Amino acid sequence: MQQHSGNGGNGEQGAGGGLDSRRAGDWAIRLLCAACLLVLLLDGLLHLFHAKHGHFAAENWFGFYGAAGALSICGIVLGGRWLRRLVMRDEDYYERD
Amino acid sequence: MSAISALPPGTLLIAGALLLPLLRGAALKAWLLALPLLSFAHQLQAPEAGPPLQFFGLELVLLRADPLALAFGVVFHLAALIAALYALQLQDRMQHAAGLLYAGAAIAALFAGDLITLFIFWEFTALASVLLIWARRSERARHAGLRYLVVQVGSGVLLLAGAALHYRATGSLAFGALAPQSPGGALILLAFGVKAAFPLLHNWLQDAYPEATVTGTVFLSAFTTKLAIYALARGFAGTELLIPIGVTMTFFPIFYAVVENDMRRVLAYSLNNQLGYMVVGIGVGTPLALSGTVAHAFSHIIYKSLLFMAMGAVLLRVGRIGASQLGGLYRSMPWTTAFCIVGAVSISGLPLFSGFISKSLILSAAAEQHHTVAWAMLIIASAGVLKHSGIKIPYFAFFAHDSGLRVREAPLPMLIAMGAAATACLVIGVWPQLLYDILPHPVNYEPYTAAHVIGQLQLLLFAALAFALLLRFRIYPPELRATNLDTDWLYRRALPAAIRAAARAQRRLRAAAQTRAARLGHALIAWLRRHHTPPGLLGEPWSAGATALWAALLLAASLLLFYLRTAAAG
């Protein structure tokens, strides 16, 4: 298994000012936090005005989809890490005789 | 009815593609773009049904143009046109011909009214599409193509066997609703399942598609699997078994997509995941679910082509496609980056883009029928889609970190093709009724309600934030150049190893048997030699006295036996 130096997968971003810099990453996180707060606020308004008519009761809970999204990603990433331990082999695994 | 209109749409594409190797320069390019348009015009004037054809006593229906076939026909033609445009700058006429032959066969298969016609075009797609893998002209592609061909042709053989059993049981070859419980129906379902990449039958897709050429993968992503989805929708709508199968398909590829480094292989896993939604829709089987399946296939073909086109452009310009080897390409390829982001947000289901208005039909249909577990799993898988296709693909290729790569932007025809696909994603997302109007069942569904839009935005934004934080705190696994074992390990490693072990065991057994036989032979020869050579009993000449004594003893024994026999008879 070869790891590329300066791999973005490790969150190692350049210190420059481009969209691939660490600073841009930090800004992206701040923007996402703000956007998440905004949609939570809107979700609260829907809740107040009883404008949610989901097929399942859970859909009408405050912040249900936000929690589902965040928890799903955490589960998927952790599951992926576990899967990697199980299935990862050298790059030339099938070429080797 | 003219002779041409009696033929199924797609046959014009096949005939026209055969002329491509004869053309050069501008004529070649013009013909390449004109063919999908001409073929679409052919579809527009196709009658509802063509005349039946007698073939060895069987009645074949080459043309049956109902709303299901027509809807798939529209998007197959659109995909063929976009892919042809994307491939326009390519100098390889064999690839051009193979691409359009493949598209033509897939379109013709949509209009097959019987199982034998379906089988013929089913196998035709396999034969034409493998050329798009072999056109890469590498050893890896040659092997991957062979494996792909075995699986695809095998699927056709299952279909033919199923059709034969179905004919024996029912006396009909008509391709309509089939019974999965009957032996023929079960074999046909298996044949469709192979091509639709059902769990455990799926790995041909991730094995072969990333090994095809830059343009070949764009063609491949559109037709084979969606032809299988069409066939399942026609043959097995409402088969509840398809719901758990589809859910599994949406689920397991998202974990592989986390750890896979090859971006085109990530997209192949993502394709598998998207097929899962469609299979669930077919399993639910209500008019809304079936229309949702067709709508999602339509959206999916376009945004998946767009994502494969963007990654193809990166492969063309950079020469490699591993996430660990890319990054910061937005500087060099801004248009490709923008189009890729449109594909990424479309597949993620962001409101105003195509995935949002198609996937929600399937989710609503599952919820309406109270398939609670399936619905919950599809919601989780939706977050997974955002992670692997919505974020991973554009992020690691175009942002992440400055890899120092400075390359040219994609060629103009590629950019136009990507621009057209991106526009289609947006148009369908903004005006969903355009798509809903061509679906096989009327759709009375409003995707843009406040609750739906806010719910979806919440899901996507919180998922994106979780991804960003996992990446920031280095919990997200790093991109590594590696091979990840999947079910292809069974036939690429385990099966050859088992065959080698069996051959070794057979050789050992044969050698052991030969040694034992040789030992026995030697022992026998030694025994005979011992007794037949001096000083063995039979090896020495006997004296006259000894010979007379032995003769007398034999005579006495003979007389005694004769006496005993006579006494017993008396």
Image (cartoon, coloured by chain):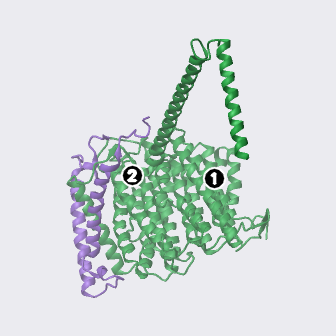
Chain colours: A purple, B green
Q: Residues within 10 Å of mark 1 (few under 14, many from 20)?
A: many
Q: How many marks?
A: 2
Q: Mark 2 is on which residue type?
A: Pro
Residue drawn at x 36%, y 66% is B381
Residue linked to disc 1: B32
Q: Which mark is in front, 1 or 2?
A: 1
- Chain of residue at mark 1: B
Q: Nearer the viewer, residue B431 or B174?
A: B174
- Chain of residue at mark 2: B
Which element is circle 2 on?
helix
Q: Position of residue B66 (x, y in %)?
A: 64, 74
> Looking at the picture, does residue A86 appear above or below residue B423?
above
- Give left or right: position of B397 versus B119: left
Q: Is residue B317 visible?
A: yes
Q: Residues within 10 Å of mark 2 (few under 14, many from 20)?
A: some
- Give left or right: position of B270 versus B128: left
Q: Which mark is residue B453?
A: none
Q: Mark 1 is on which residue type?
A: Leu
Of mark 1 and mark 2, the one earlier in the sequence is 1
Q: Are marks 1 and 2 in contact (CB under 8 Å)?
A: no
Q: Position of residue B61 (x, y in %)?
A: 72, 68
Image quadrant where one finds the N terminus of chain B: bottom right
- Give left or right: position of B558 versus B437: right
Q: Is residue B113 visible?
A: no
Residue drawn at x 64%, y 55% is B123
Q: Which mark is residue B334?
A: 2
Q: CA distance from mark 1 to mark 2?
A: 27 Å
Q: Position of residue B258 (x, y in %)?
A: 33, 54
Which element is circle 1 on?
helix
Residue drawn at x 66%, y 52% is B31
Residue lying furthest bottom in this view? A49
Q: Position of residue A79 (x, y in %)?
A: 29, 58
